[in-house]
Image: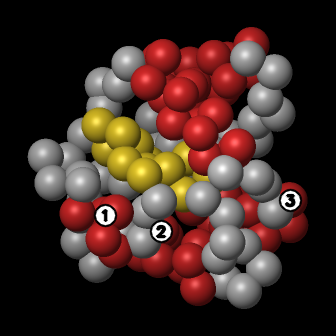
Amino acid sequence: MFEKNQEILEAVTYILTEEGYKVNGFTSEKLFLDGAAEEKPDLILLDVIQITLEGTELCRQLKILEDIKHIPVIVLSTHTKANEVKQICADEVIQKPFDIDNLLEVVENHLAA
């Protein structure tokens, strides 16, 4: 999981861990990319702040790296046009602030697919 806001990162990590998921959280883009390439997680939660080329670059990089491009990417964002990220690179978009039950449902659905 990549989230720039440490408090949100800690909260989501806690919630998912309580549900039995193993979570690796990062606030650094470089560490996150390295971690994702090394760990090859089952799912990626990604904070996207701006729906611009620069703001979605990390998401696009995930979808072009051969070893991890198949991994579902769920974007968490406060941006009003966050759904546009789904057309660019995300498998799902969840608007912040988000409902915990909805987050868990989306995570569960993508892991079950």
Do the residues under discs 1 and 2 have CB atoms within 8 angstroms?
yes
Q: Earlier in the sequence, mark 1 or mark 2?
A: 2
- Identify the residue shown where x is 31% and y is 32%: 96
The image quadrant where one finds the N terminus is top right
- Label 3 neighbour load within 10 Å: few <14, some 14-19, many 20+: few
- Label 2 neighbour load within 10 Å: few <14, some 14-19, many 20+: many
Q: Nearer the viewer, residue 12 or 111?
A: 111
The type of residue carrying mark 2 is Cys
SS category of the residue bearing label 1: helix
- Circle nearer the viewer, 1 or 2: 1
- Identify the residue shown where x is 23% and y is 71%: 52
- Label 1 neighbour load within 10 Å: few <14, some 14-19, many 20+: many
Q: CA distance from mark 2 to mark 3?
A: 17 Å
The type of residue carrying mark 1 is Val
Tag 1 residue = 85
Image spot of residue 4 (x, y percent): 47, 43
Q: Nearer the viewer, residue 105 or 90?
A: 105
SS category of the residue bearing label 3: helix
Q: Is residue 105 left or right of residue 108?
A: left
Tag 2 residue = 59
Tag 3 residue = 39
Image spot of residue 19 (x, y percent): 73, 17
Q: Is residue 106 left or right of residue 111?
A: left
- Vertical order, 23 against 45 (above or below): above
- Identify the residue shown where x is 49% and y is 50%: 74
Q: CA distance from mark 1 to mark 2?
A: 9 Å
- Vertical order, 66 against 16 (above or below): below
- Vertical order, 104 against 28 (above or below): above
- Identify the residue shown where x is 81% and y is 62%: 40
Name the residue at the top extreme.
Answer: 18
The type of residue carrying mark 3 is Glu
Q: Earlier in the sequence, mark 1 or mark 3?
A: 3
